[in-house]
C-alpha cells in the first residue's frame, strides 16, 4: 500500500485494506462485512469487572439457539466461576468457540461441553467438542489471521475469528491454546484471572 493510506481516516483505511484483502485472497466484501465488528471489539479497551461466567455462557447459548437446534447439538455447561473480565469481549470469544464447535463436525450432531478448573490465581476454561479435529501440524495456525484449514465450500468463515479472540484473551492477561486429534475432536482452553475473594 502507498503512503496515501495513512492520510485516510479510519473508515477510509478499513475500505482500502478490505480492497487489498479481496484482491489477494479471493474473499468477497460480503465475507468481510461481519468481521468489522470483530476487529473493533478486539481493539476495544478491556473493561474489567467481576463476571459470572455462567451467565455469559447462558447468553451465548441463547443467541445461538437457532443454530443449536438446527444442528441438534448437545451442549453441556458445568459450574463456571466468577472471573475478572470484559463481559462483551468474553461473550464474543465463547460465541466464536461454540459456533466453531457446531460448524466443524463430520455430519453427526455436535456434542460440546464447557468446564472449568482452578489453577492458582486463574481459571482454566475448556471447550470440548467431538468434531473433525485438527492435524497436529496445523494447530498453531488456527490462531493466525486468514488461515483456513478447510475449504470454503464445506465450512464458512474467513479465518479471522480465533486470531482476534486470542488477542482478547491475551489482553485479559490469559492464554488460549488448542489440543486436537483428527476424527476425535478438539479442546480449546483459555485462562482468565479469578476474582481475588473467590474461593471456589
Image: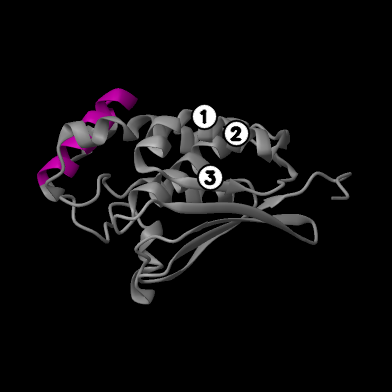
Residue 19: % across, % down: 15, 36
Q: Residue at x 37, y 60 (%)?
A: 142
Q: Is residue 123 magenta?
A: no
* Residue shown at the point (65%, 51%) measured from the top left: 173
Q: What secondary structure predominates along the stretch shown in magenta?
A: helix
Q: Nearer the viewer, mark 3 or mark 2?
A: 2
- Residue 28 percent location from the top left of the image: 14, 37
| Residue matched to label 2 | 58
Q: CA separation, marks 1 and 2?
A: 6 Å
The region drawn magenta spans 7-23
Looking at the picture, tell me which residue is in the foreground, 8 or 21. Answer: 21
Q: Which residue is mark 1?
A: 62
Quadrant (top left, top right, bottom left, bottom right) of the N terminus = top left
Give the left or right position of residue 13, taking residue 40 as reference: left
Please report whichever mark, 3 or 1, sits nearer to the chain's N-terminal start. Answer: 1
- Secondary element under disc 3, as helix, strand or loop, is helix
Describe the element under mark 2 as helix, strand or loop: helix
Relative to residue 191, is residue 89 drawn left or right? left
> Looking at the image, which residue is at 44% across and 61% down?
130
**Dots 3 and 2: beta carbons under 8 Å?**
no
Amino acid at each position: 500500500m502507498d503512503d496515501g493510506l495513512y492520510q485516510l481516516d479510519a473508515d477510509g483505511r478499513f475500505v482500502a485494506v478490505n480492497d487489498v484483502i479481496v484482491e489477494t485472497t479471493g474473499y468477497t466484501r460480503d465475507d468481510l462485512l461481519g468481521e468489522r465488528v470483530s476487529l473493533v471489539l478486539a481493539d476495544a479497551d478491556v473493561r474489567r469487572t467481576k463476571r459470572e461466567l455462567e451467565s455469559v455462557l447462558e447468553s451465548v447459548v441463547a443467541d445461538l439457539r437457532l443454530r443449536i437446534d438446527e444442528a441438534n447439538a448437545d451442549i453441556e455447561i458445568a459450574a463456571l466461576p466468577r472471573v475478572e473480565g470484559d463481559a462483551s469481549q468474553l461473550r464474543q470469544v465463547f460465541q466464536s468457540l461454540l459456533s466453531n464447535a457446531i460448524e466443524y463436525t463430520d455430519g453427526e450432531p455436535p456434542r460440546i461441553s464447557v468446564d472449568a478448573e482452578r489453577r492458582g490465581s486463574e481459571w482454566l476454561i475448556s471447550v470440548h467438542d467431538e468434531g473433525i479435529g485438527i492435524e497436529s501440524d496445523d494447530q498453531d495456525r488456527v490462531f493466525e489471521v486468514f488461515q483456513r484449514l478447510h475449504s470454503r465450500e464445506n465450512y464458512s468463515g474467513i479465518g479471522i475469528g480465533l486470531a482476534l479472540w486470542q488477542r482478547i484473551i491475551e489482553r485479559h492477561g490469559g492464554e488460549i491454546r488448542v489440543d486436537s486429534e483428527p476424527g476425535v475432536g478438539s479442546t480449546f482452553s483459555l485462562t482468565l484471572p479469578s476474582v481475588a475473594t473467590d474461593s471456589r
